[in-house]
Amino acid sequence: MPNHPVMTMDAISVFLDTHFPQLQNDGQHYRVTKIGTGTATMQLDPGTRHLRPGGTVSGPALFTLADVGCWIAIMAQVGPIPMVVTTNLNINFLRLPTQAPLDCDCRILKLGKRLAVVDALIHQGSSEEPVAQATATYSIPPH
């Protein structure tokens, strides 16, 4: 892994707007808030479309947050390769999140030439009480 990310937060934002514009179809709900060596943090400020009956943030919204956050952690390290694709994502829902901003802290566990494995912890405020945890594997195409 490089000693520092090869993409800045601004470059990642442009990359997302160019290659994944549907992420923000109904407003700027998802945003990258931090990039580090082998890490990234993505935030979801949930709107009504992210809620399920009962007013909690839906599982699909949490899954999207984890998947995109992990993908961004990889992009920050390998550069803008749009066809890095998810091959597996396992998520554990731990607590009911409220309609408030959620942070997803992603950490690359392994970055190889063809595969990457990333851990994601989703929380509201304190990472000591996560609302979800995910482990994801991505295929990296030859570049």
Image (spheres, helix red, strand yellow):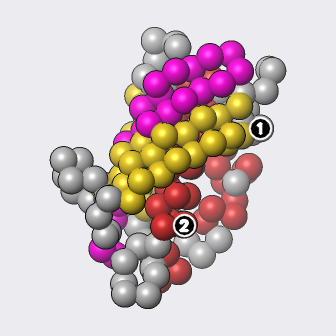
Question: Gap in Å between the C-alphas at discs 2 and 1?
Answer: 22 Å
Q: Is residue 37 above or below residue 138?
A: above
Q: Which residue is drawn at 44% across and 36% down?
A: 119
Q: Give the range drawn in magenta.
A: 98-119
Q: In this view, does 42 lie above or below 1?
A: below
Query: Residue 97: x percent and y percent?
Result: 32, 69
Query: Residue 4: x percent and y percent?
Result: 46, 18
- Report the disc number at residue 60: 2
Query: Residue 25: x percent and y percent?
Result: 65, 71
Relative horizontal placement of residue 86, taking residue 91 as reference (left or right): right
Q: Residue at x 47, y 28 (%)?
A: 108
Whether the residues at callouts 2 and 1 have beta carbons within 8 Å, the answer is no
Quadrant of the rendering where the C terminus is positioned: top right
Three-letter code for the amino acid on which mark 2 is drawn: Pro
Q: Which residue lies furthest to the bottom in this view?
A: 53
Q: How crowded is mark 2: few (under 14 residues within 10 Å), some or many (20 or more)?
A: few
Three-letter code for the amino acid on which mark 1 is drawn: Met
